[in-house]
């Protein structure tokens, strides 16, 4: 799965490297031809595309956790980022050790482990995969993309 801009999609279709699956109602015209502006194209041959890497940041941790405290489930901010295994106890700066937490829960947990403060996580933190990145970080501009991004209602 690849997300690209309209210019590259048109070039792929024009060079017969892709076919249009879904298009907009808009036409792109040149002197000799007119084609529909593609919304979804399918590559005719497999091409290895390097995966986009999501930078580990406070904003991306909160977005991954969908603006939800991973301890109490609160959706009311402000939010902080908490180390599941505290940093001073060797907890790494990684997707698997950082979670979104409300200020109240982060203060309650402090520099202790989950067992010591009798708290638990709603979901185990994971590094976002390629599909999650497309669904949540790039966003859905066109509703026709949803079936192709496994986002059917």
Image: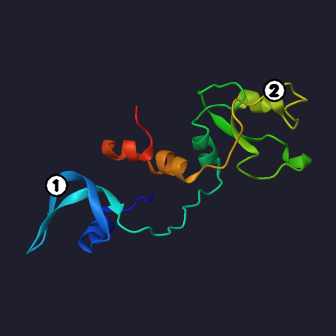
Q: Which residue is mark 1?
A: 26
Label 2 CA crowd tier, 10 Å (few <14, some 14–19, many 20+) = some
Note whether 72 is above or below 132 in the view shown.
above
**Residue 51 lies in quadrant:** bottom right
On the picture, is 44 further left or further right than 54?
Answer: left
Q: Earlier in the sequence, mark 2 or mark 1?
A: 1
- Disc 2, SS: loop
Choose between 36 and 97: the one closer to the eye. Answer: 36
Residue ranking furthest to the left: 31
Q: Which residue is mark 2?
A: 119
Residue 141 place in picture, x, y as percent: 35, 47
Choose between 23 and 98: the one closer to the eye. Answer: 23
On the picture, is 45 further left or further right than 71?
Answer: left
| Mark 2 to mark 1 CA distance (whole Å) | 54 Å
- Disc 1, SS: strand
Position of the N terminus, as image quadrant, is bottom left
- Closer to us: mark 2 or mark 1? 1
């Amino acid at each position: 799965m690849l997300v690209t801009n309209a210019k590259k999609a048109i070039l792929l279709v024009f060079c017969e490297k892709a076919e249009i699956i879904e298009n907009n109602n808009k036409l792109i015209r040149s002197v000799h031809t007119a084609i529909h502006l593609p919304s979804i194209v399918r590559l005719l041959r497999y091409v290895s595309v390097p995966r986009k890497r999501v930078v580990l940041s406070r904003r991306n941790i909160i977005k991954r956790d969908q603006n939800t405290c991973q301890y109490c489930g609160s959706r009311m901010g402000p939010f902080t980022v908490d180390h599941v295994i505290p940093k001073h106890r060797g907890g790494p700066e990684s997707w698997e050790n950082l979670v979104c937490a409300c200020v109240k829960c982060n203060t309650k947990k402090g520099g202790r482990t989950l067992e010591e403060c009798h708290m638990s996580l709603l979901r185990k933190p994971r590094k976002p995969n390629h599909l999650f990145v497309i669904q949540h970080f790039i966003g859905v501009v066109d509703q026709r993309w949803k079936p192709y991004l496994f986002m059917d209602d």
